[in-house]
Amino acid sequence: MKRTTLSLAVAALCSNAAYAVPQTGTSTRVVIGGATAIQSSTQNAIIDNLCAAGSDIDVFSGADHWNVACEIDSSFGAAAGTTVLFSKNNGGSGQGATSVEVPVAVEVLSPTSTCVAASVPVQSTPKGTSFDAWVCDGSGGSTEVLENVNPDWGVSDVEPTLFTGPLSILDTDGVTPVPFPAGGQLDSRATASLPFGMVATLSLYQALQAVQFPAGSDCNPDASLGGSDSGSITGSIAGNGIRDEYEAYATDSAQPVSFDGTGAHIPETPDSKGYADQPHRVGDTRACMPTISMTEARSMLRGDYTTWEQFKAGGSSLFASAAGKPWAPDPGVNNFVLCRRIQGSGTHATIASAILRTECDVQASVMAEPGFNFPQIILGNQGSSNLGECLDDLETKRANEQGLGVKAWAVGYQSLEKNPDLEEAYRFLKIDGQSPDLKNFVEADYWIFGATTVNRNDDNNDGAGEYFNPVGFFPAVDQMFERLVAELSDPSNLTDLNAGLGHPFGWGGFTGTKIAGVDTLPSFPFDPNPISGDPPLQTLTHVNPSTGVSNQCFGPALRSVGGAVAAPADAADAE
């Protein structure tokens, strides 16, 4: 394998010795601001489609942000072989929109950081492209150095114009709102769409199961009530009342691979964070997934609850129903806790506009602000990974940045790109009885989604980007931008990204609108399997037909192509 200047030090490593990523090892740099909900897919798209096949590729992961260093692909003409450092800011979608237009400098991982080999030093994308993985987050002898740099590109979960009012990004002081400017010249390209949903800590999830499924049913978490797995399994996966493919995996030598909602092929693995006292348990099937109503979701996000005693299930307090059960919070901890994103987040804007109608109409409300208004606790999080850690900390009683050192019930919201491997102790919830999986989304049974955009500044209005960091080969940067847009738009490409998003309750993932550049409607019934199923084509749209512009506040409505309308009613409902 050919070695770039950037990774000469890598080749010499035979242990986890730290080394500083040399700034001089790259010919140029492209800084990308924005969305954390789709950060894994953005990284995979860069590795698979912008980096030269067969060349050395290095991925450097900080606590929040990451860099990819590689030679760019030969298809980029005279610039082929140029070593590029792609620096991705994971500060939220607004930093992939407003920050690109204004511009506003975004925080990124500096190439002067000292990095060590990851515990799995050679990894690969779902498409099979291998890369060397490095950790630069301050652990294991590494040193994270951050810097503020103007972004060249941006990635957002929603259209840039949504980032106004209470959804605006905050300036570098963390206080002053910076709304997306009216009349800007941002070149914004609609790409894939991705479902989002409400999530709950594992114990809260199980408390909901206990009141929503009858005693003794396979979906009731109380193993003492006679579920089909009662007494058959011991250890951290016992006690959810379900003898399904999850538990079979722990005991049987051969398992079927299934992500169709009947049970995922996910092994019970030790807690990778090393907290042996609270191993993460496997999740539940779609049939056993508890639900909340849209009204309850709205009340949770607004902060209408101050304690969990106020949340009623079947007319009684959910908190009281859990007394003495393994899923109860610690004694006396009845605080209502919401793990939310800070404003400027696309995940936040997607959920706020869909559930609260924030910035959409006169009946709109806003999400509860971060703060400790005891007994209510609202915890703000910069990125989606931080929000996942917030929930995980509260479930596992860790005391750190967001953890309170006690076991507490909490809710939050995430994209369906998050937690498919169940590494963190939170679970997705149904809303009004509908699971947020890809099949339900394509068949229009679930409708909370963001329409992703990839953005660049075009203040000259000449069809080419204006960039801050690349040096000497702007045409190639334009070509790379177009390639990234294409990769995140075409369902034939999205299937590679979706292959890593098999959840316990079904496939998650992205949908697109075009095949080979041609607008295409999905077929029904829809098979979401990215390996053998149907192309993940979009049924619902936020595009307003009167303007032709995507507007998160519009609809969603059924897509139409050439007079034909997507007809999910013709689909066979698997529920």
Image: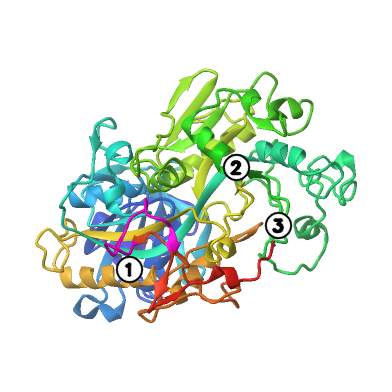
What amino acid is at disc 2?
A: Ser
Vertical relation: 187 (above or below) 553 = below
The residue at the point 37 percent across, 40 percent down is 358
Vertical relation: 11 (above or below) 327 = below
Between 350 and 226, the one lying in front of the other is 350
Name the image colouring.
rainbow
Between 401 and 84, the one lying in front of the other is 401
Vertical relation: 464 (above or below) 145 = below
Say whether disc 1 or disc 3 marks the residue closer to the N-terminus. 3
> Magenta segment, principal secondary structure?
loop
The stretch in magenta equals: 544-557
- The answer, for residue 529, to whether it is visible in the render is no
- Label 2 sits on a secondary structure element that is loop
Q: Which residue is mark 1?
A: 485
Q: Which residue is mark 3?
A: 267
Gap in angstroms between the C-alphas marked 1 and 2: 36 Å
The residue at the point 28 percent across, 52 percent down is 160
Whole-percent x and y of residue 234? 84, 46
Gap in angstroms between the C-alphas marked 3 and 2: 31 Å
User: Is residue 551 on the magenta stretch?
Assistant: yes
553 left or right of 290 in image: left
253 left or right of 329 in image: right
